[in-house]
Image (tube, rainbow, N blue to C red):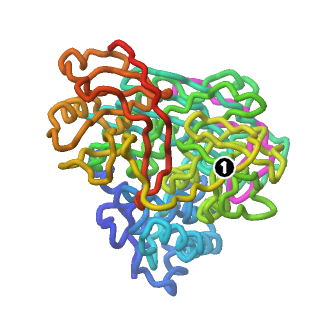
């Protein structure tokens, strides 16, 4: 049996989702690396022969070695990514090491964390996976881009970038330089300290002792720099960042524009409205390493002032939770604890499946693999809290993944106990869609959630103002505060802007005063959020 030496025939059932997506991007004329594929149905007994054929294929393609990556049929889904749960291995071009890399990646399909994650997402795990083999690139910059795409342009986006390989970024060991924006407008750029650059090396470079110097690539049109070797391992050089780059932005405006254009074109080719794209910029230009659906929207993550006696980081997963702090090492986090960890690697991903209340990472960003898994599981998460390593085990802390803050709190709130049926006669029940008829749970009103990442406010306003009277009082909750313009309201005089209990709402004038409280329910109709509404009016 032979392996595939091009992406042309990369059907998802044989080549896996990752390779199939790259094939689609290549057919659309977008830059992707040369690739070979060990298919899902490839016999393990044929792997030694495949390793020899791969070396012949890679002879003039891979001066810096090869990378073997998982490509399972079920990964990179619309709601479940399996991000970082399968292995990727960088290997020098020798028969034994290439064969070992192929076996390691294929075996990762049977890792316990994969089965646990699949069960948590109500999925059947794949029995086998394909291996996507590519020459290791030696990038100037690499990273991840997440974007909402409308009309062939990125309308809301976030880029995290590091010099060299992106492995430290996606694993959460390194916080990258962060660029956020809407459309062509840059909203914020947050710099990051990167003491070391990870780059693949030639066999001669990998033999260099610490303290030796090598030339590292730089952006096209600029001179390369010299970097000192700190150490090396697994085919990768660890280099000290050149002193002259200390105050130089990682990503140039031109590179950022090129990446946003690539992401929009990639989303269009894959038929996605939200895309998660891994990329690298070489001296020859940008390359797409992976394109997949963005399983959960990325929200704004500007660092805020820390609360009194607490700490601040990057808001990675919205929500608030409280529990005793437990460090990932030496003990796994019990259910209901707040997991404190360093790099959000596979070990932390496995801990997330044990039901922690929240997770706090000392490093990393919201686009790291396990932050993605935390979002898919709905676990509040704050990353890049450097002081978290000093939080005492057992200290009760509150994690606000919406604000990106962590603070000590006196105690864990007692669990709610419900006696008899719950009444919502004085409550507005929060929902994400308008029902065809009034709910029969006795609610005083319904509030439709405006998700700024997904829902167009104009569409919601029109839906609310044209809804049947049978739905009862119907308003819109604006979690990000009042809209920047009230231009919509004069067109719909039946709605007015009100603020209550720290919330902003669009409320129908004929409905009178607001209900006393707003509640949100889970799939089992249990209250998961409640806030009183003290009625105050705000002019629209």
Tell me which residue sits at (46%, 61%) in the image: 420
Which quadrant of the rendered structure holds the N terminus? bottom left
Q: Which residue is mark 1?
A: 413
Asked which secondary structure carries label 1, the reply is: loop
Quadrant in which residue 473 is drawn: top left
Residue visible at 39% across and 68% down in the picture: 73
* Residue at image location 21% in from the left, 15% down from the top: 490
Residue 189: x and y in percent read 56, 24
Regarding residue 201, the answer to whether it shows in the image is: no
Please say if 308 is above or below 72. Answer: above
Q: Is residue 52 left or right of residue 214?
A: left
Q: Is residue 234 magenta?
A: yes
The x and y percentages for residue 15 are 37, 68
Read off the magenta span.
215-241
Based on the picture, tell me whether residue 233 belongs to the magenta stretch.
Answer: yes
Residue 129 lies left or right of residue 172; in this view the side is: left
Quick one: 196 or 186, which is closer to the camera? 186
Above/below status of 525 relative to 444: below
In the rendered view, tell whether residue 220 sits above or below residue 365: above
Spot the residue most to the bottom. 45
Q: Nearer the viewer, residue 389 or 448?
A: 448
- Label 1: how many residues lie within 10 Å, few (<14), some (14-19) or many (20+)? few
**Residue 27 on image: x %, y %:** 27, 51
């Amino acid at each position: 049996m032979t392996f595939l030496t091009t992406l042309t025939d990369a059907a998802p059932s044989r080549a896996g989702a990752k390779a199939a997506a790259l094939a689609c991007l290549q057919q659309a004329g977008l830059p992707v690396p040369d690739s070979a594929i060990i298919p899902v149905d490839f016999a393990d007994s044929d792997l030694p022969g495949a390793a020899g054929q791969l070396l012949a294929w890679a002879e003039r393609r891979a001066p810096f070695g090869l990378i073997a990556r998982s490509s399972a049929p079920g990964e990179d889904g619309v709601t479940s990514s399996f991000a970082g749960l399968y292995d990727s291995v960088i290997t020098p071009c020798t028969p034994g090491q290439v064969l070992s890399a192929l076996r390691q990646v294929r075996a990762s399909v049977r890792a316990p964390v994969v089965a646990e994650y699949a069960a948590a997402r109500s999925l059947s795990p794949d029995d086998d996976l394909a291996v996507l083999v590519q020459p290791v690139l030696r990038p100037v910059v690499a990273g991840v881009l997440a974007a909402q795409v409308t009309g062939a342009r990125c309308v809301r986006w976030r880029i995290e970038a590091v010099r060299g390989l992106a492995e430290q970024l996606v694993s959460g060991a390194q916080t990258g330089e962060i660029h956020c924006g809407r459309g062509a407008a840059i909203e914020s750029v947050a710099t990051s300290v990167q003491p070391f650059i990870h780059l693949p090396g030639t066999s001669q470079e990998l033999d260099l002792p610490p303290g030796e110097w090598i030339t590292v690539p730089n952006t096209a049109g600029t001179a390369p720099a010299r970097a000192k070797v700190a150490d090396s391992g697994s085919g990768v050089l660890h280099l000290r960042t050149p002193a002259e780059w200390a105050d130089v932005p990682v990503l140039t405006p031109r590179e950022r524009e090129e990446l946003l254009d690539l992401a929009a074109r990639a989303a269009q080719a894959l038929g996605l409205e939200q895309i998660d794209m891994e990329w690298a910029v070489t001296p020859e230009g940008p390359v797409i390493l992976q394109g997949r659906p963005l399983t959960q929207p990325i929200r704004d993550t500007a660092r805020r002032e820390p609360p009194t006696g607490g700490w601040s980081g990057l808001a990675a997963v919205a929500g608030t939770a409280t529990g005793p702090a437990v460090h990932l090492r030496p003990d796994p986090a019990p259910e209901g604890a707040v997991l404190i960890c360093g790099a959000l690697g596979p070990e932390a991903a496995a801990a997330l499946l044990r039901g922690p209340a929240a997770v706090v990472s000392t490093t990393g960003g919201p686009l790291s693999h396990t932050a993605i898994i935390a979002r898919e599981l709905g676990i509040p998460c704050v990353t890049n809290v450097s002081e978290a390593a000093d939080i005492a085990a057992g200290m009760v802390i509150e994690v606000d993944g919406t604000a990106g803050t962590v603070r000590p709190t006196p105690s864990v709130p007692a669990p709610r106990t419900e006696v008899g049926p719950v009444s919502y006669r004085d409550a507005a029940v929060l929902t994400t869609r308008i029902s065809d008829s009034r709910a029969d749970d006795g609610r005083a009103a319904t509030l439709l959630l405006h998700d700024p990442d997904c829902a167009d406010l104009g569409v919601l306003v029109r839906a609310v103002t044209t809804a049947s009277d049978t739905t009862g009082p119907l308003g819109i909750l604006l979690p990000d505060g009042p809209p920047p313009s009230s231009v919509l309201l004069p067109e719909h005089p039946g709605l007015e802007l009100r603020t209550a209990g720290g919330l902003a709402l669009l409320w129908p004038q004929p409905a009178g005063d607001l209900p006393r409280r707003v509640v949100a329910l889970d799939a089992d109709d249990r209250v998961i959020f409640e806030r009183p509404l003290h009625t105050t009016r705000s002019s629209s």
